[in-house]
Structures are given as structure tokens and as C-alpha cells.
Amino acid sequence: MTSTSGTLISEPPPAVAAPEPVERRRPRLADLGTPLLYLLSLSTALALAGLLIALVGQSPWDAANAMYDGSLADGAAIGQSIDQAAPLLLVAVGSVIAARAGIFNIGQEGQLLVGAAVGAAIALFTPGPGPLVLILALLGAAVGGALWAGIAALLFYWRGVAVVISTLLLIFVANQAVSYAVNSPSLLREKAVAGQVTTSQTDMLAESVWLPRIGEYPDFNIGAGIFVALVLAVGTSLVLVRTRLGFRLRMLGLNPKAAHRAGVGAVLVGGGALLASGAFAGLAGGVMLTGNGHRMQDGFADNVGFDGLLVALVARDKPMLAVPVALFFGALRAGGGFLSATGVPRYIVAVVTALMVLATVFPAAYAEVRRRRTAGAA
Amino acid sequence: MRPSPQASDTAVTASRPAPDTVGEPAGAPLDGPAEHTGAASVLTVPVVQLLGIGKRFGAVRACDDVSLRVRAGEIHGLLGENGAGKSTLMKILLGLVVPDTGRIVLRGSETTIADPSAAAAHGISMVHQHFSLVDRLSVWENVVLGDRGRVDRDRARKSVREVGDRYGLRVDPDACVEDLSTGERQRVEIVKCLRRDPGVLILDEPTSVLTLEESRELFTVLRRVVADEGKAVILISHKLDEIVHATDRVTIMRQGRVVARRATADTDVRALAREMVGRELSKWTAASAVGALDALIEPGTGEPTGGTAVLDVREPEAAPAPKPRPAAGEVRLRITDAHARAADRRPLLRGLSLEVRAGEILGIAGVEGNGQAALGDLLSSLLPLDAGRVEVCGGAVAAGRPGAMHAAGVGVVPEDRHVSGCVLDMSVAENLMMADLSSVTSRGLLSRRRMAERARRLIEEFEIATPSPDTPMRQLSGGNQQKVVLARELAGRPQVLVAAQPTRGLDIGAIEYMTERLHAAAREGIAVLLLSTELGEILTLSHRVAVIHRGAVVGEMDRADVDTERLGLMMGGQAA
Ligand SMILES: Nc1ncnc2c1ncn2[C@@H]1O[C@H](COP(=O)(O)OP(=O)(O)OP(=O)(O)O)[C@@H](O)[C@H]1O
Ligand SMILES: [Mg+2]
């Protein structure tokens, strides 16, 4: 220090110039990076799942094998996984559309059920050539889902009822309504055949209105549903990124005020997005009906609506990312189904799949929370 | 831009025993007037030292070997053009941005600041350039947000009042933030920060929405508190006048580097402007940029009176050549007897009427909160009318219907660009195009190529500093975000252009350009409506001035006939 006298530098050297013991930053999860984070959370989930299965007296190793056999081991299993993935993908893509418009539809489970019921009614009672009826049934399913979501849209834009709440509550209404229809002989319940007791399910659809399947039966074979879903996922992605409509929809979701200024009507575009997401869920129901079970019964929806929602969440609202995620979830569902057939209690299977789902959701959710934290502080 | 001579001197490396010699340009005086007292004084120990800080964002060097030293007891100005790296530097100090290189020394000991809570533990607190309030919550709730422990409602409300009284930032603790004007929101932000009683207070363009009066009062009190309690304040502002009045020392940045350090007492507005921009500015711009109001009043219109505190009496500069009065065109915008209310039934507009003709700039003068925001919202289709009508080019327009005003040919540069002016999570190109999508779509399909092309043109024309058109809007510096909105609305070739606080947040070079653009717009025959709480801006730009008070226009005059006394009285609500 040469000059302490005058105008240049009058700051005396600090009393303690040597750096104090430097504070070290606490290591954070975020430092791991995304791939490692996924690895960590998946292995944690696997360990927990193994522990659980061991606790109920089964061999975790056998269980893992069963999961694998049911989802990936051979062509048939892979086909199963893909079949499971199709409706998940449809639901997910629908959720993405709503979410991008800033609307949180969580009632896909109900929309799917209503869609399937409408599809069943059309498929069972419409005369005509099979392919035409099939197409009508699928379209009807989409319309049914859209209308069911439309109730929530109406409640929101007319009365201001939050979409999250109305769509959720409408699931229960849909459950009751569809269950009633399936149980009423005058509606969808299977027609009595002399000397046979009817159960609460619909008649089997005529084979001519089943979704075509590709491949040989015992080996690899998949329903056409996945192609429908893929085409729609690609289409949605293109619409969102490449078209004026998609631009306006995204704008609405990201800044409703700026969108209003630029002429994007919240009711029209936002309501439209909600209807579209309902239509996708309804179509998922139609695909499940015409592609797999070929009849409706209690428990038809089987959480596909909720799982599809999770697919969208993990895929961070990107339609193309939803494709691999849906396949993964489909494999989980197929494997889980197989596992329950090997004697592991059903509820444990449910917990195991839930753990896997959590493991895949966690890194995305964690990243989102961190993003909000820093954005909120900035 | 050419490298500055001073910048090259800053590369001195750290020598351990005296880390505080790093990076001081040899020729720059470092001391505020207060510091000559003695070496042993506690006041001279730097509270904050940022040493050799570097930060890159991709190809952009936001900070490049920046050193900043702030002492206890001083208000330190940080100056620089839009995108110079000021906010980034402060975010580094606050732990929001991790620097690539450099050290932070707090009160003599080297420190790593991992996140804002760590910064808060060190007593560092910041008022950000953009609001971070929760609209739906009340003022006191926003103020205690982020506190730990039990929330004591009455204590919180009391402290809001106390802090407000102390610093001259009065806000009603029970008001809902949603209903506040931009200026009031800014006050809440500052109160929130001050309530924590920070040892180091960072203010990032806090006064761009405060009145001159308010900012004067704030800085008078701050200066006292800072000196008495050994605190430190870092102030970022584009208002050079304010910098000169409020600070002890300034550090000037250009393109990520420090180009000068000055004791405020040894410099003046003109010199600061020159060093910041790297060239001489026209007298006229400089005067308007710093709010030297008297320079704007033609000689002979009388002394500014003490009647309104907004007026700033200073040595008069050359008055501009009187603007030729434009040939009056046809009426482009006519608002007749407009009445409107807020969601809580509070009246916003009470019978407002005005006309703007093609080719003229009508300036709306008034104290903030008298309906300017509502008028802006009305012309942005965001506010429906209870009564009255809006006509654009002779045709009635449905107020409040989405996009109706826009479709009728009204372009709006809204007051708060972040709220309704742009979409932060879309790209710069998308933001530039969003008002005029049809020009880049054919049969519903967007043409990426045409979009990028047009965006690139606007970026060049308006000198928007962005790495590429595809950069997310969020990553631009505050001033450059403003420029994007301005560019979009000006390029839209509207019939009527509404510009609310068009120069807020812009550096003086950009203000000069803005001023030119608004004049050019009027020359091209656009009817321009200028909403501004800064009288200087109104007087610089307008051909005609209307005064707004309590939601109605209470008087009008030609720019040439402006008499500040009468204007002041009218703004205060007295008939004149
Ligand atoms: N998160 C980010 N990602 C990428 N680039 C960034 C980011 N934040 C800032 N930048 C870039 O760094 C540069 C400096 O930005 P900064 O916000 O510090 O400017 P500033 O001096 O505060 O300007 P203004 O007066 O306009 O607010 C700009 O070019 C900006 O685009
Ligand atoms: Mg900034």
C-alpha cells in the first residue's frame, strides 16, 4: 500500500486481511444433475419396494422378475405394455393442452369414463358397417369426454368455480352416473339371456367394432390405439409450436393479461382447451373399450385418468416427451398386473407402482420447485 | 464499442495483504467527501467488496472483471446502460446468480453467498427492478411474506406504518396489492426491504416509478440513516439527477466492465452521461433525461413556483427550438364521458373525455393514481366501461372485449410491461410478433423463418441487446425487455399509439432514441397519447397537454402556452 495520505486510496488495509475460514456451501441435491437425480430416486424407490415385498413375505427378486416378465420379457409382454400406454398417452396429451392454456384439468378419470360409456352406447346400439360404427363410437367417446369437461368449463366461466375443484368432483358424479347406466337393464346393462344371471356389465361389443390389432396373437401384438395416440401426440405438438392457434393458447397460459390485450379470448381459447383435454380423455376411454376390454364394468377406468395426468407431469407438459413416459408407465402397469397374478397382494402391487411413479415424478417436481424458488426470489 | 481507457487499468491482480487495492483505476478518486478524516475510522472499512467478478451467460459477458467497493456510511451509485450488467452484479451479491470468477469480501472476510437467505443473514437486502409482490394479498401480508416464525398481524401492520412514516413511503397496510398503483407497489417493495433493517441495502431502479418528491424524501432519510448507523446503500438508477443528488460515490459500468469510478462531488450529470454512454449526448436529451425541468420551459414563461414540489429549479439550459405545431389532422381517438370502476367498485374514471388527432402528441399530465393506469387499461381492452364511449377513427369500439382496441388500430406500450406487455417465458421473437401474428402466418401456420427475419430487423433497429431472437424474454436485462415492447408497438403501424411511461427503465441513450421515435410516429400521422407522471417527459414530447385529476380530464393547453404554475394547480385539483 503506497498511498494512504491523499486522494488516491485512503482505505487502510482491513485489520484481518487473511481470509477467514471460508464458509463452504452446503452440497445440494441439485448439484447432482438430472440423470443422477433420476438414478438416485429410482434406486431409492426400488429399495423401498423390495423392502415392502420382503415384509409381506415374498421374495423381492421373484417380484422383480414377475414385473419384468409382465412388461418386457417377450413380444407378448411388450405388446401388453404398449396397449397400456395408448390411453395413458391420450390422457396425457389432453392434460398438456389444458395445462399449456393455463388450466388445470384433473378430472380425466371421469371424462374417460363418460367417454367410454357414450362410446359403448354407440357401439352397442348403432346399426351399420363395423368400421363406421367403430369410428362413430370413438368420436362419440371424445364428444362425451368433452361435454363432461364442458360442465367444468361452464361452471368456471359462468360462476367462477375453480376448474381443479369442479373437474375433481365431476369424477365422482361420473362414477355414479356410469355405474347407474351399467346397472340399469334399460340402459347399458347386459341383456338377459334365458337361464343366465346378468351381472353389472355391458354386453360384449360385436367383434366388427373392435379396434384392429396388429401382429400374431400369442406373440407380439398391439392394438391400433397406440397409433391413434401417437398421431395425436405429434399433431398436438405441431399445433402448439407451429400454428397461430397454438401460439395464442400458449400465450393465454403464460400471461392471460397480455393475451387478452392481443385478442385471445380466455373463454373461447381457454374453454376450448379444457374441452379438448376432455375429448382426449374421452377418446382414451373409447380406445380402452374398443381396444382391450370390449365391454364396460365397474372399475373400468382403473386409474388411467390419474396415471395419464402423472405422465403429463413427468413429461413437463411436452407432448413428445409424453410418448416415452407413457410407454414407461404402460410397462409399469403391465408389470404390476402380472405381479398381482403371482400372489403378491394387490395393495402391495399398487404401492410398488406408486413408488415407481413417485420416483419418476420426483426429479421433475424437485426441479420445478427449485425453479420457482429462484424465480420467486428474483 | 471501443474499450475505455480506464477499463484496461482494472486488471491488477490481488495481492493478499491488501486486497482492497484490486482493480482501482489509477486516476479515479475513490473517496467520498466524508472519508478524509482518518485511517482508523470504522467508517472507512468497506462493508462490501466485490473483487474481479466475472459472469458469462453463454456468449454474453454480463460481468467482466468487475470490482466494486462500498463503504459503511455511503450511498454508492451504480450506473450504466441497459444491459451493462448492473442487475447481474447485484444478483451475485444477493446469491441469486453464481459468479464464474471473483471474490466477495464482506466486512473484511471472504464469503460465499449461496442464496438470498444467506445474503439476508449477512444483512444484505435488495429491492428488485421488477415487482415480486403477490397481487391477491394485502400490503402487510406481502411485507411479512418470507419472514420466519409466527405472524403477528397487528405488529406487522404497525411496522409497515412506522417504516412508511420514517422514510416518507406511506402505504395503507390493509390495502390489497392488486388495487395499488405502480408507484404504491414500489413503495411496498421498498418498505418490505427496509423493515428488515438491512446493513446493506441494494436498490435496483427503485425510483423509476416514484415521484421526484418521494424519491427526494426517501433519499434524504436514507442518507441520514446510512450515515448514523454505518449502513451502506447501493443505488442503481438511470436518473442521473437522482444519482448526483443522492450518492456519495459512483461506479460506472459499460458492457460488463467498470469504466469509471467517481466521487459524486467531483462530477456532474453531463460528465456522468458521457462516461456511461461513451459519447456526448444532445443537450436536449440530457436535460430531459435527468429531469432538468426548467430547461424545458421556454424562457419567459415565468419562474417555476414553489407551489408544486415536482418542479426542480436549476440553472436553465438552452431551450429547444419551438416545435412547429402540426397541422391538425382528423380525430383518431375520441373518448367521451367514460366512467369505469375497479373490481371493488372503486371509481377509476369519472367522466373522462379526450380527443387525439392524427399527427399530434397529446401528453396526459397528472399526479400518479388519478386514472392514468385506468386510461391505459381501457385502451388495452382490459377495462370495460360502465358508461361512455370510445371511438377509434370514427368507429365505436367495445371496451373490454379481448383484443378489440388492438383490432381497431390502437397500439399500447403499457405502463407495467411485465404485467400485460410481454410474456416472459416466450422468446424475444415471439414477443416481438405477438401483436401482429397475421403477418407471419399463412393458413394458420406460423412461418418461423419470417418471424426470425422480422424479429432480427426490429432487434437491430431498436438496438435490443439479446444473444439471439430465440432467447427467452426473461433473460434480457430490464431495459432491453422494455425496448422489446416499444419496438413491437411502434412497428405495428397503429392508428393510435398509447405510450405509458415510455422511457421508464431506459438508459439515456435509449431515451433519446425513444423520443425521436415518438416524434417520428407523430410526423407519420399517428395519433400519440402519452401518459407520464414525469412532467419533464410530457413537456419534452407533447404538442398539447391535458391534465388528469380524479379520473377526468380537468384542463387542456397547447404546449406553447404551458404555464407551469397553472399546470401544477390543475394537477393538484384546483380549478385554473
Ligand atoms: N439469466 C440470464 N441468462 C442469460 N443472459 C442473461 C441473464 N441475465 C442477464 N443476462 C444478460 O446479461 C446482460 C446484463 O444484464 P443485466 O440485467 O445485468 O443488465 P442491467 O445493467 O441491469 O440493465 P438494465 O438497465 O436494462 O436493467 C444482458 O445482456 C442480459 O441479456
Ligand atoms: Mg437491470
Image (cartoon, coloured by chain):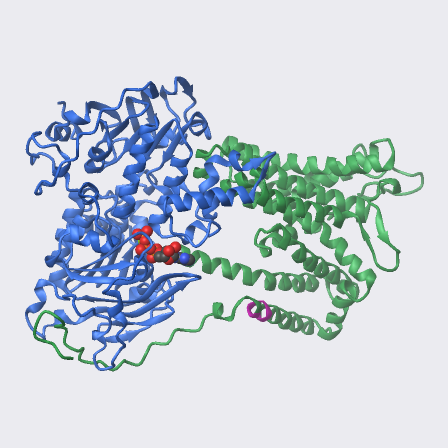
Chain colours: A green, B blue
Q: Quadrant of residue B489?
A: top left
Residue depicted at x 10% and y 72%: B41
Residue depicted at x 72% and y 38%: A141
Q: Main secondary structure of the magenta part?
A: helix
User: Which quadrant of the frame does ligand 1 lie within?
Assistant: bottom left
Would residue B568 be found to the left or right of residue A92 on screen? Answer: left
Residue depicted at x 73% and y 75%: A61
Q: Nearer the viewer, residue A203 or B551?
A: B551
Task: Find the magenta span and give its range.
Answer: A36-40
Q: Quadrant of residue B347?
A: top left
Q: Nearer the viewer, residue B184 or B20?
A: B20
At which x and y percent is residue B481? Answer: 37, 47
At which x and y percent is residue A193? Answer: 91, 39
In the rendered image, the quadrant that contains the C terminus of chain B is top left
Is A360 situated above or below A103?
below
Residue A171 visible within the image: yes
